[in-house]
Image (cartoon, helix red, strand yellow):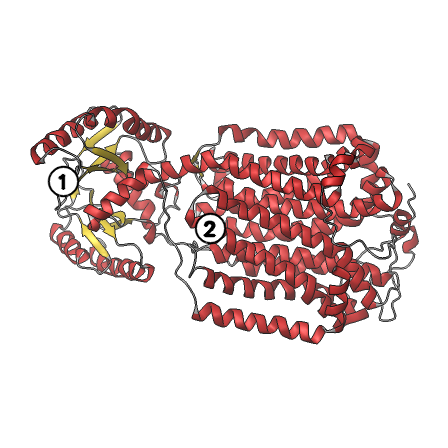
Amino acid sequence: MLARLARACYHRRRFVVLGWIGLLIVAIVAGGALKGAWSTSGRLPGTDSQKAYDLLKAEFPGRAGEDGAFVFADASADPAAVATFLAKAAAVNGVTSVQQPPELAPDGRVAQSAFTLATGDDARTKAAVTELKNLAKPLQGHGDVAFASRWFDVQTMPSSEGLGLLAAVVVLLVAFGSVVAMGLPIITALLGIGIGVSLISVLARFMSTPEFTPQVASMIGLGVGIDYALFIVSRYRDALARLRPPEEAVVEALTTAGRAVLFAGCTVMISVLGMLLMGLNFLYGLAVGTSIAVLVAVGAALTLLPALLGFLGFNVDKLSIHRKRKGASTRISLWTRWADFVQAHPKPIAAIGFVVLASASIPVFSLHLGSSDAGNNPAGTTTKTAYDLTASGFGAGSNGPMLIVADTAGSAGSASSKAALASVAKALRSTPGVVTVTDFIGSPSGKGAIATLVPSTGPQSTATETLVHHLRNDVLPSATAGTGIAVHVGGQTASGIDFSSMVGQRLPIFIGAVLLLSFLLLLMVFRSVLVPLKAVLMNLLSIGAAYGVMVAVFQWGWLGSVVGVTGGPIEAWAPMMLFAIVFGLSMDYEVFLLSAVKEEYDATHDNAHAVSAGLALTARLITAAALIMVCVFGTFVLSDLRALKLIGLGLAVAVAVDATIVRCVLVPATMELLGEANWWLPRWLDRILPHLAVEAPAERVPALAPASSPVGSDGSSDDADPDAERVGAGQR
């Protein structure tokens, strides 16, 4: 199948290239004409905070938006100016409620006024934020106002795509030594990103899609697009170095590296689509959108790239930056020597690699899922200032007030409802960990009531989480027994706790499903039980190490000053997102490595030789691909946003660990220790498993020259590698 596809794309290369350009144009036009609205919030079905929100929206529509607060550094400096500001703020389109007059702290200086922003229309909300900032300018030096709301965060994000492309250009130039060869992965990746992001805009019209989906999809699309093209172009250049005609070189590249690309892309999509199992609707668009980007990258690698190679032929190595080297017959590949060293000392090397990764994973046992708050924002930002002023004037818990929402529709009557609500408020006030509870305010319909509770601890404290569960499980059921009233604990703090609980409960299901599906796919591809099992376990080790680094830096605060963060909980979505992305990318590298090993093993049935040859042939490319990924992900650490720093560092560490310790140390060492058992597959299982080998190469040519060898226009190689000949001949 892939051979026919390769020949078709080679012979009809003009139509293929024009077709991809046409698809890009159509996608851009569709993305502009059918663009949907990004989702900025999501439901938490079945949670107590969601019930509180639904009741709030029905009975108190003005309070059902996103809560925030104006915090005044010194309200006594100009009370009239403060009052004027609040009156004007209440009239801003998109602001549904403003607390007037403001609440004054015991120190008589700091004051705060709660407000609510309407949700559902981002443009209106952003316009309201801009207008509120302008209204606050006269207060500078006269009480100064800070804003406690995520909408007022100054979110700076470096151009990850731009910096990632720059890093890719440098790495590819070093890897290929040719400007032309370097340009092929860049072209296919950019075209794929353009199509993928445009299609995601259309997806947002039909599916709940977070606003950061294009950035995530671009990041992943750029990485896998360059990776896939890197491996195919390298195999094509290897074939040319052995004097194969360009058409046959294209066929060989697609039936070997292209086959690995196809299966690697499937593993990435399986991993990312596993997020659908989380049951959180606002993640659906993210999962599908990222999968679209990967699918487009695979399609471009398997069709557009062969067409472009058809135009270039032997000129793929034009504009070489390497000097021609003579006497290369005495040069020995670094990776071949490393492979031989690992195979000579497999036990100590495997033990060292395992100890390093296990040690790095230890902090995972202290993982605390939660939500960072404005207290973790950079100093000097308005949200950080508001947070600190509120904590100093009213106490830490004032930064995370909770909404107590009562459903009084089932109570006997108005008088009994008021008495029952007063009893509930009294019970809440007497609960340890509660500072204040306002009196309940009834809704116009009389079917609902609302009160505000302020805890003694901050929103990201474990004590606050314990308090929420205690209120829901013990205090409120006891206080409302026999009254016919249902009381729910809501607000941003409670919603964050519920989100963390949901993710924590469903994360094992998600991880288990992805592991199982990936194992089954690799089982069918490599016809082995131990190889896919080992791949899954190794990938878990690299992800565990990444989790451990995240906990140490972002939760414990180790090296926090270097990264620019303070200690706090790990964002609840981060482990899920990191696992989905990193597991897929790790399996990419695993598939590329094992495909080369399996190809050698099928030809020689010598496990030791196959492992050594597979590592020697792919390690340099895997390292180059991983370096590009690390650079792309590492740019996220430059952001001001803690959440982006978190996911950027986690991804960079995971990919770096996987491409070095796992792929170049643990995998060859363990495969050497297992020997022929690597390829064990029970006969009964072999009979029932479908064969997913897309197509084996029609003619196996084992002597694989290094991709860094410049190939002249006449097909001759200026830098032949004796290691390739030694590997192909099966010499040890």
Q: Quadrant of residue 94?
A: bottom left
Relative vertical location of residue 117 with respect to residue 713 in this rendering, above or below? above
Checking the image for residue 284, the label placed there is 2
Frontmost residue, 242 versus 148: 242
Instruction: Out of 312 and 647, give the one closest to the viewer.
Output: 312
Q: CA distance from mark 1 to mark 2?
A: 37 Å
Question: Can you give x and y, in whole percent of width and height, for residue 341 in the image?
Answer: 82, 36
Residue 374 position, x and y percent, is 35, 43
Quarter in which the N terminus is drawn: bottom right
Q: Where is mark 1, residue-wise?
A: 441
- The disc at residue 112 is none
Q: Is 407 situated above or below 293?
A: above
Decide: few, some or many residues near mark 1? Use Cα within 10 Å; few <14, some 14-19, many ≥20.
some
Estimate the x, y position of residue 670 in percent, counting from the top left. Answer: 75, 33
Secondary structure category for the residue under label 2: helix
Place residue 240 in its image quadrant.
bottom right
Q: Quadrant of the C terminus?
A: top right
Q: Is residue 528 visible?
A: no
Return the disc, 1 or 2, that comes first in the chain's sequence: 2
Q: Is residue 271 left or right of residue 316?
A: left
The residue at the point 42 percent across, 61 percent down is: 205
